[in-house]
Amino acid sequence: GENVEQHPSTLSVQEGDSAVIKCTYSDSASNYFPWYKQELGKRPQLIIDIRSNVGEKKDQRIAVTLNKTAKHFSLHITETQPEDSAVYFCAATFGNEKLTFGTGTRLTIIP
Amino acid sequence: DAGITQSPRHKVTETGTPVTLRCHQTENHRYMYWYRQDPGHGLRLIHYSYGVKDTDKGEVSDGYSVSRSKTEDFLLTLESATSSQTSVYFCAISESGGNQETQYFGPGTRLLVL
């Protein structure tokens, strides 16, 4: 089946600095890659996604890059703020109906 | 948040008892999913449904069954709960489930099996 590896598992960043989270996937047929943010005690919520025909996508301070040849994609958060502290999950499509999730990155923004 | 509710939100039960969790959606989405979330494992798919009475297994389906008799409801049953099934359970929905479709999550159910 599909396997998605996510690194690092924990990340601490000084407020205002950038954070990068990386994921690799195994299924070369995967073509949709969402990122979810989960605050403590809450549900995962989509923050950005990218499709296989695009190399990069930005939404304000958040960007995602995709390298299909190398089968990896990354989440970039610039000018980090305390409210960015959360657990972030990457995912990749598996077959036509399912997502496989990474194991998550706990991001802590240090004031 | 998408129109997804889960019930109960919290449950404590004893080993060996049956437990049923309910996911209800008001979006008329075709696909519904059950995940469990455990530290160090992220979100793992238990079962999913691609229509009324149409279901399939995910990667961690042992000990679980599901039913979908109406578009809006997807039930997850633990036939005989075990302590290893202590977890947070999330339901998710997506419109078509085809490639490039986003899944929206419910608020979760926290289950403790003693």
Image (cartoon, coloured by chain):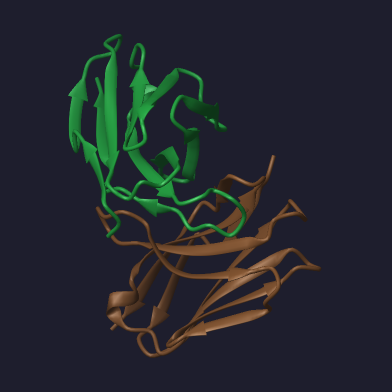
x 36%, y 13%: residue:
B79
Q: Which chain is brown?
A: A
Nearer-the-camera pick, A14 or A70: A70
Q: Position of residue B66 (x, y in %)?
A: 41, 23
Q: Is residue B54 above or below residue B38?
A: above
Q: Position of residue B85 (x, y in %)?
A: 37, 25
Q: Position of residue B53 (x, y in %)?
A: 46, 24
Q: Is residue B67 above or below residue B38?
A: above
Nearer-the-camera pick, B13 or B47: B47
Q: Is residue A101 above or below residue B60?
A: below
Q: Residue furthest right?
A: A69
Q: Which chain is green?
A: B
- The reply, left or right, for residue B71 in relation to residue A75 is left
x 24%, y 53%: residue:
A41
Q: How many marks?
A: 0
x 33%, y 71%: residue:
A85
* Quadrant including the C terminus of chain A: bottom left
Q: Position of residue A58 (x, y in %)?
A: 52, 84
**Which picture quadrant has residue B87?**
top left
x 35%, y 86%: residue:
A15
